[in-house]
Image (tube, helix red, strand yellow):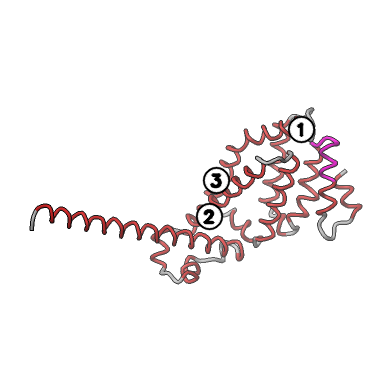
Amino acid sequence: MSRYVIILVTLQIKMRIMQDFKNISTYKEGLKEKILSTAMAAFYKNGIRAVKMNDIANALSISKRTLYELYKNKEDLLFEGIRRYHQLRHDEMRNFASGDVSVMDIVLHSFKLEIEDFNFANPAFFSDLLRYPRILEYFEEDKKNDQKQFMSFLQRGIDEGYFRGDLNYDLVVSILELQHKHIMMSQLYQRFSMKEICYNLLFVSLRGICTSKGIAVLDAFLGESKPQGTQTGQAAVCLH
C-alpha cells in the first residue's frame, strides 16, 4: 500500500471519528435541553423538593447515570434553569423597552409577566428556592448588576413626566428592595395571590413616586386589572 493511500485512509478514519464526536456532542446538547425543560416544568408544577432526579430520568426514559453525567445534582440543574429563564426574561424586557413605549408601559408589562410566572407556578416552587443559597446569591448579584440600569430607568421616568423629581431614589430603591424581600421571605404569596400583593402593596409604592400623569396611567391599568374579590372601597384606601 502506497504512502499516499495510507495517508488518505488515515484521514478518512479521523474524519469519521470527528463526525462521531460531533454527533455525540449534538445528541448530548439536545438531551441537556430536554432534561432542562422537563425538570423546570416539573419544578414549577410540583415544587422543587417534590421532584427527584429519578423522576426526571423516568420522564425522559433515560438512566440516572446518563442524567448525572450531564447534571451532577439537582441544584446544578435548577441553577441552570433559573439562569436561562432570567436571561430570556431580560431579553424579552429589553426587546419590549426598545420599542415605541413609555416608562409606564414597561413597568406595567413587567407586572403582567410577573403575574404570569406566579400563576403558572406552584407556590411551593418559590418557597423551595429559599433553601438554595447559590440561587439566592445569583438573584442578589443579578440585582446589583441591574441597579445602575434601574436608576437610569427611574431618571427616564422623571424626564417623561411620569415620576416625581423631588425624591431621593437611592432611599426609594432601598425601601422597595426590602419590601420585595419581605414578600418573598415571609411567603406572603402562600396567603394571597401575587396579583393581590401587587395591587394592594407594590402599586401603592409605585403610586407614591408617580406624578399626576403617571397616576392617571396607573389608575387606568388598575381599573382594568383589579383582582377578583377586591372591594372598590378597599382599593381606594390602598391606592390613594
Task: Indicate whether 143 appears above or below 6.
Answer: above
Q: Nearer the viewer, residue 182 or 141?
A: 141
Q: Position of residue 150 (x, y in %)?
A: 66, 36
Chief secondary structure of the magenta span? helix
**N-term mark: 2 or 3:** 2
Answer whether residue 72 is visible to the viewer in this image: no
The residue that disc 3 covers is: 138
Task: Indicate whether 229 appears above or below 176.
Answer: below
Badge 1 crowding class, 10 Å Cα cut-off, few under 14, some 14 to 19, many 20 or more, is some
The residue that disc 2 covers is: 81
| First to last magenta residue range | 209-219
Quarter of the rendering containing residue 95: top right
Q: What is the CA distance from the residue labelled 1 to the residue labelled 3?
A: 32 Å
The residue most toward the top is: 166
Q: Position of residue 31 (x, y in %)?
A: 44, 62
User: What's the residue type where badge 1 is placed?
Assistant: Glu
